[in-house]
Amino acid sequence: MSVTIGEVLRNHVKEKLARDEVVASMTVRLVGGIEIARIAKTAGFDSLYVDLEHSSFSLETTSQICMAALTVGITPLVRVPGVAAVPRVLDCGALGIIGPHVRSAEEAHDYVRAAKYPPLGERSNAGALPHLQYRAFAAAEANAALDAATMVIVQFESDEALIRADEIAAVDGVDMVLIGTNDLLADWGIPGQYEHPRVREAYEITIAACRRHGKHVGVGGFATRPHLAADFVRMGARYVSTGTDLGFLIAACAQKAKEVRDIKLDAPK
């Protein structure tokens, strides 16, 4: 039976962003089984990203989670520890990468070159891929479709990135800027001060730069302050990194333990 690339390759995050809808994402850095993809789908997430920057996950584990996400219909992304990891995580099932600590247009270009096929980038052709259900398509058709579906997301986590926001957002092939609020606050020497006026200013600068160049903005670091994430969505951000599987598990466990501790016993007669 003949199958088209469009029938097997979809990036639901890109589709939602194109419709100006808000994307909900969760970060995976604890649960290494494929079950996490089904849990994310059942919970209502549009995407998950495997965090290779801050976890001990292997490439094989990453691949299994990404392929499971593709199967259930949510978009698998991977935050990489550096540019060298980009081709491998894409070939193993990711539909996009998150490049941390980008400070310049050249660093953004490096991620694009690693993620995209020629002429935009230098990604090598690996043949049949899990994104295509291991089906063989003509190379020109497959490369074009994969390039269109694959996201390049760069993170702003320093004042230097904000100063160069416009030139970074202008880089051809960059789809989104995700602000890493915790690292940005640390760079400013005010860790944990989420309500600081400089945070809002950072989002204003980034959203304005991305609007000028037709790019999207992601919100990160507000797992404990959803009202701030909501504020920045209303300002124009459209991708929300809601928190980690570890954080969700701890919060749920703590709540249940508290419920038991709060049980009031009847006074002894």
Image (spheres, grey):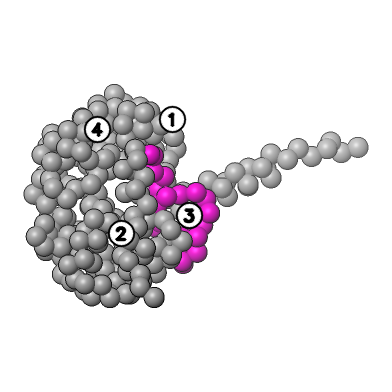
Query: Which label belongs to residue 95?
Result: 2
- Magenta-span inclusion, residue 41: yes
Name which residue type carries label 2: Leu
Disc 1 is placed on an element classified as helix
Q: What element carries label 2?
A: loop
Mark 4 or mark 1, earlier in chain: 4
Judge whether 62 appears above or below 245 on screen: below
Q: Which of marks 4 and 1 is in front?
A: 4
Residue under label 4: 207
- The residue where tag 1 is placed is 227
Q: Distance between the residues labelled 1 and 3?
A: 22 Å
Q: What stretch is highlighted in magenta?
A: 21-49
Disc on the earlier residue, 1 or 3: 3
Q: Which quadrant of the figure has residue 171?
A: top left
Query: Which amino acid type is marked by label 1?
Result: His
Q: Which of 203 and 56 lies nearest the eye of the viewer? A: 203
Horizontal side of residue 43 vs 257, given as left or right: left
Residue at the disc numbered 3: 40
CA gap between label 2 and label 1 equals 29 Å
For residue 88, side relative to residue 41 (left or right): left
Q: Give the crowd class for mark 4: few <14, some 14-19, many >=20 residues within 10 Å.
A: many
> Would you identify the image quadrant in which residue 117 lies?
bottom left
* Distance from the alpha carbon under mark 2 to that under mark 3: 16 Å
Q: Is residue 116 left or right of residue 3?
A: left
Residue 217's mark?
none
Query: N-terminal of the two: label 2 or label 3?
Result: 3
